[in-house]
Image (tube, rainbow, N blue to C red):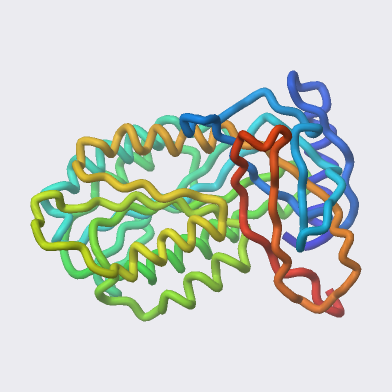
Amino acid sequence: MTRAAIACAALALASAAAGAAHAQVFRGGTDTVLLSVTVADAKGRPLAGLGPDDFLVFEDKTPQTISVFASDPQPIALSLLLDSSLSMERTLTLAQEAAVGFVQRLGSDDVAQVIDFNSTSDTRIRQGFTGDRQALERAIRRIQPGGWTALYDALYIGIAEAHRQRPRLAEAVRRQAVVVLSDGENTESLKTSDDVLDSAKRSDVMVYAVAIRDKTNAKPRGYNEAEYVLRALAQTTGGRVFVADDPAQLPAIYNQIADELAHQYLIGYTSKNPKRDGGWRQVAVQLQPSSMAARTRAGYFGPAKGR
């Protein structure tokens, strides 16, 4: 977001959420940093009902003052990425059914797009951003297997497309997320893993990854670069990685992701760092008491001179 857009969005959010139950909102300033925060209980389930006094926010280890807070999840723009390479042929139908169930859980103000990927030349946006669940379902069901796995290209496109859905008007604060499902390594991409990681750090898009492992493969697992990149993306953006040893687990995994996206907190603060050097600023959110775990993006690039 631009600084002006963030300010307008924060003010609109404060006005809209001020009367909501369990939500206390403070007005933010022109340099407000917005964070989507997930809180999990001891069993890893999303925890609702917290207030601003339950959170501590740090930037480069310096405590920050919360100026925007909402416990009601804001609308989301979701890039749904599905691996359609030949190795997915046996599991694609189950993956499609799980993805259809996932889009059916979108909120009334949410929008999503569908991207399927295999070879570099065959990464396609099957359906652009829309709130029409039937259109999304049709796009998912049109996907057919074929080709190799251009995972990094698909992630780069998905992150960029979701990032473009940031609100340009004052009427809304819209979260952005990518949910990617794949069963293998990146075998064919024009973009590199560094390209994807850098793109994620320069956006405010959460990345959730679902990795399907072949439990019939008796070979010992070695280093898997793609899985490492997916975990790095999730850690950097405040998302999460899920591993399915059986495609039958996919509906439950997608439900977990939907539950998490439906129970996130929006926290904003005005950075106490006056520098305009464009440098990376590390962000951390803690809970009081600290027995609960909070997850958000790892940081952001600060403003540069002239911006």
Is 54 in front, or is 303?
54
Q: Residue at x 55, y 70 (%)?
A: 199
Q: Is residue 103 above or below residue 183?
A: above
Nearest the viewer among 105 and 219 is 219
Q: In this view, does 279 lie to the left or right of 159?
A: right
Instruction: State the residue at coordinates (34%, 67%).
Output: 226
Camera-side residue of 243 and 157: 243
Give the answer, above or below, for where 63 lies relative to 266. Answer: below
Q: As displayed, is residue 165 above or below residue 49?
A: below
- How many marks on residues? 0
Tell me where residue 245 sits by quadrant: top left
Seen in the image, is 119 located left or right of residue 151? left
Q: Which residue lies furthest to the top in this view?
A: 21
Most foreground residue, 285 or 91: 285
**Which residue is rendered at x = 75% and y = 32% of the image?**
54
Q: Where is residue 297 in the image (x, y as percent from the top left)?
A: 62, 55
The quadrant of the image that shows the N terminus is bottom right
251 with respect to 57 (left or right): left
The residue at the point 36 percent across, 46 percent down is 242
Q: Position of residue 306 (x, y in %)?
A: 86, 79
Q: Is residue 243 above or below residue 300?
A: above
Q: Where is residue 21 in the image (x, y as percent from the top left)?
A: 74, 19
| The C terminus - image quarter | bottom right
Horizontal arrangement in the rendering, residue 71 relative to residue 232 (left or right): right
Residue 264, image x and y in percent?
61, 36
